[in-house]
Image (tube, rainbow, N blue to C red):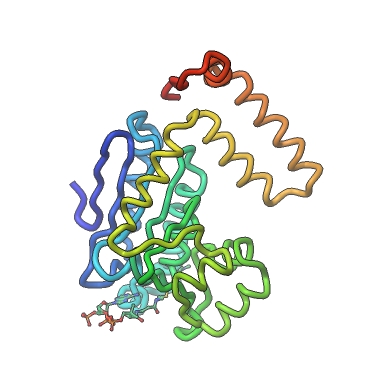
Amino acid sequence: MYENIKFEVNEGIGTVTINRPKAMNALNMDVLTELYDVFTKIESDDEVKAVILTGEGKAFVAGADIAQMHKLNPIGGRQMMMLGHKVMNLIENIEKPVIAAVNGFALGGGCELAMACDIRIASEKAKFGQPEVGLGIIPGFGGTQRLARLVGKGMAKYLIMTAEMIGADEAYRIGLCEKVAAPEELLSVAEKVARTIASKAPIAIATAKTAINNGFDMDMKSASKFEIETFTAAFSSEDKTEGMGAFLEKRAPEFKNR
Ligand code: DAK
């Protein structure tokens, strides 16, 4: 059904694999369109509790497709920007956890895609970077904003202005990824994390994601108020009765789908 991505669901865990290894999984309009389509479907698929996003071959994603961008006029560039932002925003805001399993190069738009995910697990072979200034542009899929929010303003400026490529250990040190795994264990580590999250109350997970994402851009007072409202939604759920009841009855909880 898709030409540039693969999608499979295994016992509640969806895996999206970007599959253009000959071009280092570079994001062209077709890949972005397919990503938008698959994440739209995932959003309303109750079978999928958590998602892993990874790349086939040596790269996670080596950026937006330079060959395609080179030919784009400003209107085409704007269309690409709109689509790219739509994909990143969908992944960031979908009410399911999305884990980037960064298997190799995550450059430019690839680093931005990883940053739109909730959690990044990097292979020891992964390389992160924002090389755009060397191409005469700046990060355009939210990178100037998400990188600064993840690693701080100074480090974001350092990485964007120098275009330096960093390895997994340095990415971990500065907070650009949350875990590092041996290359051959990357997907099993990502799946273990996905299964851990999927075993918790789905409404609580979705609510926590919303509270963190939205509150992060607010002042503390507004963010605390937002937490109260989102907490109330989780507190009113059947999952809260089940989770607390199970604890008191010393048994494992059985959460509803959604
Ligand atoms: N685009 C297109 N093709 C790419 C590519 C890319 N980003 N990255 C690699 N490829 C292609 C290569 O051209 C090569 O193709 P053939 O020559 O075989 O036909 C093939 O993939 C294998 O690559 P290499 O031969 O270069 O492989 P190496 O192992 O030697 O090097 C590398 C791997 C990842 C270090 C290297 O390929 C590389 O430096 N790639 C480019 C990385 C890069 O600069 N990425 C940032 C792209 S800029 C926008 C919003 C956002 C963006 C743009 C616009 N709008 C708002 C409009 C985002 C921009 C970016 O991401």
- Name the residue at 76% across, 39% down: 224
Query: Residue 132 placed where, x, y %?
Result: 48, 79
- Name the residue at 52% across, 66% down: 172
Query: Residue 203 placed where, x, y %?
Result: 52, 28
On screen, 71 above or below 146? below
On screen, 55 above or below 10? below
Query: Residue 1 placed where, x, y %?
Result: 18, 46
- Name the residue at 54% across, 21% down: 243
Q: Residue furthest right?
A: 221
Instruction: Give the left or right position of residue 224, taking residue 173 as reference.
Output: right
Q: How many marks?
A: 0
Q: Quadrant of the C terminus?
A: top left
Instruction: Give the left or right position of residue 128, taking residue 207 as reference.
Output: left
Q: Quadrant of ligand 1?
A: bottom left
**Which of 7 and 41 lies nearest the eye of the viewer?**
7
Instruction: Give the left or right position of residue 152, taking residue 257 as reference.
Output: right
- Name the residue at 60% across, 26% down: 234
**Which of 197 and 146 lies nearest the eye of the viewer?**
197
Q: Quadrant of residue 181?
A: bottom left
Query: Residue 113 placed where, x, y %?
Result: 44, 60
